[in-house]
Image: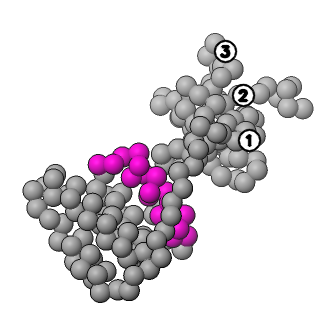
Amino acid sequence: MAKCLIKKGELKEGANHLYLATQREPNNKWYYRDLGLALADLGDRDQAIETLDKANQLYKKENGKDFAKILAKIEGLKEKPKGERIIFENPDTSVATISHGVVTKYNFERGFGFIKDDNDGTNVFFHISKVKNRTGYTEPTPGLHVKFGKELGEKGPQASKVWMFSKREIS
């Protein structure tokens, strides 16, 4: 998701997703590399250097040698003027917003799917384990109206709880 945001020109938002990814997976060199490159594009030279150095350290620990492209980028950044530090905020992921939407896709074999949020049109991931009022063998199906708790997950918006409605309940 972060790379898509960055490609669309939403550097700060993409960098924020990468920052959250580094918090969740502190040993993932690729998240640090991508975050460092995004910070460099945003003009935060010092934090970009720190982040790219962290990516190189993780790479070196895993491969026994430096990541030459990262080191070259760090050297290039040292010649640039110092920019303003980018501040990232950790969202309170324990608070979910309640939304309504429609199931658009559901994979019965793997037990996950997507809900299109009625409010903003985003596709929200959900897992069958988050469905609360499931009885017997009732499974979500495309077109089913649901209410759900929406929070920021590892790869974007996800449902923390999902409540399915029969057609009678929403009419």
Report crowding for label 1: few under 14, some 14 to 19, many 20 or more residues within 10 A (C-alpha).
Answer: some
Q: Distance between the residues labelled 2 and 1?
A: 12 Å
Q: Is mark 3 on a helix, strand or loop?
A: loop
Give whichever of discs 2 and 3 has the lower sequence position: 3
Q: Is residue 20 magenta?
A: yes
Q: Residue tagged by mark 1?
A: 99
Q: Is mark 1 on a helix, strand or loop?
A: strand
Q: Residue tagged by mark 3?
A: 135
The residue stretch that appears in magenta: 10-27
For the C terminus, the image quarter is top right
Residue type marked 2: Met
In the rendered structure, are the residues bearing label 2 and label 1 in contact, judged by CB atoms less than 8 Å apart? Answer: no
Confirm whether residue 120 shows in the render: yes
Position of residue 96 relative to residue 12, above or below, is above
Please indicate whether residue 1 sits to the left or right of residue 92 in the image: left
Give whichever of discs 2 and 1 has the lower sequence position: 1
**Residue drawn at 47 percent across, 64 percent down:** 15
Q: Position of residue 91 (x, y in %)?
A: 57, 49
Confirm whether residue 105 shows in the render: no
Please indicate whether residue 30 sits to the left or right of residue 146 in the image: left
Q: Position of residue 39 (x, y in %)?
A: 42, 71
Q: Which residue lies furthest to the top in this view?
A: 136
Position of residue 170 relative to residue 123, above or below, is above
Q: Is the magenta stretch mostly helix, strand or loop?
A: helix
Task: Locate residue 168: give its quadrant.
Answer: top right
Of residue 156 and residue 89, the one placed in the foreground of this image is 89
Residue type marked 1: Ser
Please indicate whether residue 7 sits to the left or right of residue 77 in the image: right
Report crowding for label 2: few under 14, some 14 to 19, many 20 or more residues within 10 A (C-alpha).
Answer: many
Q: How far apart are marks 2 and 3 (CA)?
A: 10 Å
Q: Position of residue 113 (x, y in %)?
A: 57, 38
Q: Distance between the residues labelled 1 and 3?
A: 22 Å
